Image (cartoon, rainbow, N blue to C red):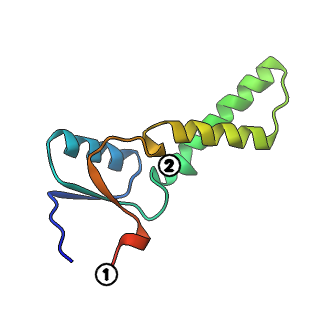
Amino acid sequence: MQYDYNIVIIGSGPAGLEAAKLAGKNNLKCALIERNKLGGICFNWGCIPMKFYIQKLKEAKKAGVYITLEALYNEKEDFLSSGCYGGNCKCNCRYFSPPTIKG
């Protein structure tokens, strides 16, 4: 199998997706490779969800409201799926994940 791309981006975290968008704006054929969920560690499990949790817990404490872990998790999942990282990104790249990559 042969591929014809101008650029290959490894990792779909914030920098990878930004590079993919820039490649699309410059009409480059792009391949985006991610070993797990689109958005990478930072967006799905790292700094962005943690900041989301901290902000929501501060808001709940200030309002004197009790929030369950399940409700907090579900709200975070809704937030993450609504943006570019939730698959709504228009970066004009072919997306590869481990099941589709052949050595």
CA neighbours of label 2 inside 10 A, class few (<14), some (14 to 19), many (20+): some
Q: Position of residue 2 (x, y in %)?
A: 17, 74
Q: Is residue 76 above or below residue 29?
A: above
- Tell me which corner region of the image, top left, top right, bottom left or bottom right, holds residue 91: top left
Amino acid under disc 2: Cys
Amino acid under disc 1: Gly
Q: CA distance from mark 1 to mark 2?
A: 27 Å
Q: Which mark is residue 42?
A: 2
Q: Tag 2 or tag 1, which sits nearer the N-term?
A: 2
Q: Secondary structure at mark 2?
A: helix
CA neighbours of label 1 inside 10 A, class few (<14), some (14 to 19), many (20+): few
Tell me what residue is drawn at x 19 percent, y 38 percent: 25
Q: Position of residue 44 (x, y in %)?
A: 54, 49
- Tell me which corner region of the image, top left, top right, bottom left or bottom right, holds residue 63: top right
Q: Is residue 56 above or below residue 80?
A: above
Q: Which mark is residue 103?
A: 1
Q: Position of residue 12 (x, y in %)?
A: 39, 53
Which tag is nearer the camera, tag 1 or tag 2? Answer: 1
